[in-house]
Amino acid sequence: MDWQKYSCHGCGDCCRDFTVQLRKRDVQKLESQGWAERIGEDVTQEFRGQIYLKRRQDGSCIFLREDGLCRVHAEHGFSEKPVACQVFPFNLAPGENSLRVGVNFLCRSVQRNVGAGLLDHRKDLRRFADVIPELNRPAPEAPLARGIDPADEQETDAVIESLDGWLQSEDFSMATRLDGLAFVIQSLGDAKLENVRGSRFVELVEMLVGVLPEELALLPVQEPSRRQSSLLRQAVFTRTEDPRIESKHGRFRTSIDQLIRSRKMRRGRGFTPFLTSELPQDVDFRRIDGVAPFTESPDCEQISELFLRYARATLIGRRTWGSAYYGWSLIDGLQAMVLNLACAVWVSNLCSAADDRPFCRLEDVQRGIGRVDRHVGRAPWLGTSVERLRQGYLRIDDGLRRIIIRGW
Ligand code: SF4
């Protein structure tokens, strides 16, 4: 994956945005560095049984300096920072015999594709494996589909290579490529795969991808139905929701507030509720739906390049199934990938509508993808059966195809 580049340029975005969960070893290190005495307050905070780095009122890390650098890094060195801070923007997950490496598109350098190729980071990645013991414990491969045996290497490789090859086929527009991606994933989700294993499964995937140009022409995709649009907005809600660890409100009040905002998203009438402080609120839903397709944006070429890179990096980095994604099966995880891409489009349109632009600019899409990817594989509520149920409903009646090409 050397076409994806990254080097930290010290923008500090991740330090303003993430809630950093600490390991026992991180807490011990911070204690031995004597911060509480020097700063005059605790630097960690407990939330629902876990320990986190404390954040300031504006959400930034307590260690973020005015020049955008980390105080722990500056005074004690990179390896003395909490492990999560050292590893970002890499997403690391153990495989059966190897380490799975993805990158998080919240990172500005990853979005802009600047820095060293990912292969140049091999040394750092090996070092991370030394400090995170669970990366060295082999993790079982993900089931091929829910309730059936794990996918073997041949099956997983066939899916990745065939879909990646399709995504790169320059003879087709980005809308067609994404439509084809959803078509194949939806078809695999509908298939009874128990008896279609090994080379038969590989043949099935290759056949589905091979006939895409003819099939898509015969089965033109419709606009999403009202129910599908509503499910998509609810999925956006869960992918942008950001519980504040410093909130003084109790669980009950927080849950009621969440319920009201989620209902507003489901209905999609009037104005958008508060989602997270990083995104606009009170935007007319009709304006969001009225944002022109990406093809009408002067930044269309860069937007397409960013989406393509995001989709490919997610797929090749195996970020949405197995140990990287709540232990989900390969097929469920591919559906989650489609849904995440569709949510990123919706959030991009939200940003554009909030700024009264008739079409998205590249920065809207960077925000959209960054916001959604921030949660991928991290937010525990994305791994629940409710999420799986939502995907199941969306697969019905061509839903995944209908929502993914919305916006193109
Ligand atoms: S967002 Fe990326 S480039 Fe910016 S400080 Fe964090 S890791 Fe570095």
Image: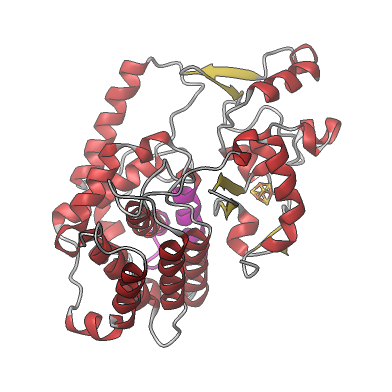
- Relative side of 106 to 119, left or right: left
* Residue 367 is one of the magenta-drawn residues: yes
| Above-or-below relation of 152 to 139 | below
Residue depicted at 49% across the width and 66% down the height: 312
Q: Is residue 305 visible?
A: yes
Q: Residue 250: horizontal and vertical position, in percent?
A: 38, 14
The quarter of the displayed image where residue 84 is located: top right
* Residue 124 is one of the magenta-drawn residues: no
Magenta residues span 351-373
Q: Residue 67: horizontal and vertical position, in percent?
A: 77, 41
For the residue pair 167 and 130, the one nearer the viewer reads as 130
| Above-or-below relation of 144 to 198 | above
For the residue pair 160 and 20, the one nearer the viewer reads as 160
- Relative side of 310 to 211, left or right: right
Image quadrant occupied by the N terminus: bottom right
| Above-or-below relation of 313 to 148 | below
Q: Residue 205: horizontal and vertical position, in percent?
A: 33, 72
The quarter of the displayed image where residue 184 is located: bottom left
Residue depicted at 40% across the width and 64% down the height: 155
- Relative side of 132 to 357, left or right: right
Q: Residue 360: horizontal and vertical position, in percent?
A: 42, 65
User: What colour scheme governs how the chains and residues are painted in the rendered image of this protein?
Assistant: secondary structure
The quarter of the displayed image where residue 172 is located: bottom left
Residue depicted at 30% across the width and 78% down the height: 207
For the residue pair 360 and 225, the one nearer the viewer reads as 225
Secondary structure character of the magenta stretch overall:
helix
- Relative side of 90 to 38, left or right: left
For the residue pair 333 and 204, the one nearer the viewer reads as 204
Image quadrant occupied by the C terminus: bottom left
Q: Is residue 274 visible?
A: no
Task: Count numbered badges in the picture.
Answer: 0
